[in-house]
Amino acid sequence: MSEAASDPKVRAVFDAYPPAMREALDYVRLLILESARAAGVELIETLKWGQPAYLPARPRVGTTVRIDAVKGSPELYAVYVNCKTTLLDSYRLLYPDAFAFEVQRALIFSTAEPPPEEALRHCLALALTYHRKR
């Protein structure tokens, strides 16, 4: 992994992925960490529902971002956000053709191609600072 996970349980989840999935999720993890740094958000890396999760260390800053392989598909993975936010609506307005969307909860990607980096960085920053703008 580009930066070692601070929690050994998180590291174990990454280590258990097949190589192509681990590489894709590690890249998204790096984008999450860089987006948080650029936004001035200190993150906690942990597991939620068995998935790597990234949440602002201070309350009322942003919402949790989770990443994981999509069950039943060897090449799809997702970036999940809280379905009670308006984030997916915003992502759809900003980037209607950049992502595959899963209702109100996730952006879906394939290991066969890299995600649209700049659009994804922006979406991650919006999630990690979600409460700042309210």
Image (cartoon, grey):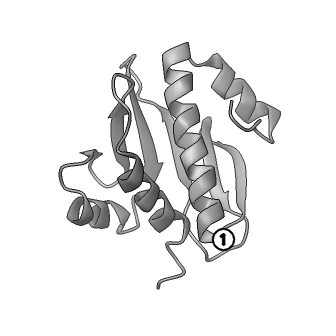
**10, 34: nearer the viewer:** 34
Q: Residue furthest left?
A: 97
Q: Is residue 34 above or below residue 129?
A: above
The residue drawn where x is 52% and y is 41% is 28
The residue drawn where x is 35% and y is 35% is 109
> Where is residue 80 drawn, in percent x and y?
45, 48
Q: Is residue 74 above or below residue 63?
A: above
The residue drawn where x is 37% and y is 47% is 106
**66, 120: nearer the viewer:** 120
Is any atom of residue 63 visible in this view? yes
Is any atom of residue 18 visible in this view? no
Q: Is residue 105 above or below residue 10?
A: below
The residue drawn where x is 61% and y is 47% is 53
> Where is residue 9 drawn, in percent x and y?
76, 32
**48, 27: nearer the viewer:** 27
Quarter placement of the N terminus: top right
Picture quadrant of residue 78? top left
Relative placement, left or right, of 7 versus 94 is right
Relative placement, left or right, of 118 versus 60 is left
**83, 119: nearer the viewer:** 119
Relative placement, left or right, of 102 versus 12 is left
Q: Is residue 121 above or below residue 14?
A: below
Q: Which residue is mark 1?
A: 40
Other-residue count near label 1 (Cα within 10 Å), few / some / many at <14 / 14–19 / ≥20: few
The amino acid type found where label 1 is placed reads Gly
Relative placement, left or right, of 28 versus 53 is left
> Where is residue 98 drawn, in percent x and y?
25, 48
> Where is residue 103 drawn, in percent x and y?
26, 50
